[in-house]
Amino acid sequence: MRKHWSPGPRGGWQQSEVPPADDAAAWFTGRLPEGWFTTTDVVVDREEIIVVGTLPDLDGDFADDAARAAAESGRIARHREETREERIEIARQAEHRYGRKVAWGARQGGTEELFTHLSVPVMTRLRQPERQVLDTLVDAGVARSRSDALAWAVRLVGKHSEEWLGELRAAMAKVDDLRAKGPDQDTTEKPDQDG
């Protein structure tokens, strides 16, 4: 189990255990009703599981890309309404199983929408040069606040280093596997059986 920090009973922060979610993608694949999605992406972190499914292709011709995008957005909205009650129940079961909130989304063609998702505060300490970077983004109108600027910077780094981040995640998974296969942590000495 991974540990993460969560609000304590008196406003402080305490460490708590989060159940593993290594099998979350498989669980959702088995749990989702047939025909909802042609493919499903499941992304897990310490606080949230995001499930984004691809809807079946639209039939028909469209006058232009804007008309196609509008039809895709409408189809996603219809899927959201038609599946709301069942998604709530599936999310409730997954939240109980994995100890994380579940967010939903759908994509069709070039349109993708997240229905709900968490926005988790992350505490950090920044020195003046780092704060100046954020303030420059705010002053330039790229972001509304330092918080928005920090989120923008994280998205930019993620976009431009996705391959490296993927390799890092794969390496961390290998370390977790090796830890699981390692010797027992019990180091107490056993008495000599020869007497």
Image (tube, grey):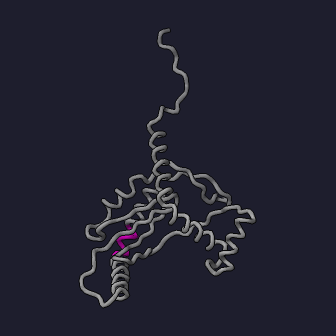
How many tags in the picture?
A: 0
Viewer-proximal residue, 100 or 38?
38
Q: Residue furthest left?
A: 60
Task: Indicate the position of residue 187 as horizontal and vertical percent values.
Answer: 55, 27
Task: Indicate the position of residue 80 as horizontal and vertical percent values.
Answer: 37, 77
Dividing the picture into quadrants, the one containing residue 68 is bottom left
Dividing the picture into quadrants, the one containing residue 71 is bottom left
Residue at horizontal 75 percent and vertical 65 percent from the top: 128
Q: Which residues are magenta?
A: 83-89
Residue at horizontal 63 percent and vertical 54 percent from the top: 14
- Specify the principal SS of the magenta part: helix
Q: Residue furthest right?
A: 128
Dividing the picture into quadrants, the one containing residue 13 is bottom right
Viewer-proximal residue, 18 or 56?
56
Magenta segment includes 84: yes
Task: Indicate the position of residue 48 as horizontal and vertical percent values.
Answer: 49, 63
Q: Residue furthest bottom?
A: 63
Viewer-proximal residue, 63 or 28?
63
Residue at horizontal 38 percent and vertical 64 percent from the top: 41
Note whether 193 is above or below 98 in the view shown: above
Residue at horizontal 69 percent and vertical 79 percent from the top: 139
Magenta segment includes 87: yes
Task: Indicate the position of residue 108 as horizontal and vertical percent values.
Answer: 34, 76
Q: Is residue 61 left or right of 173 when viewed as pictured?
A: left
Viewer-proximal residue, 166 or 108?
166
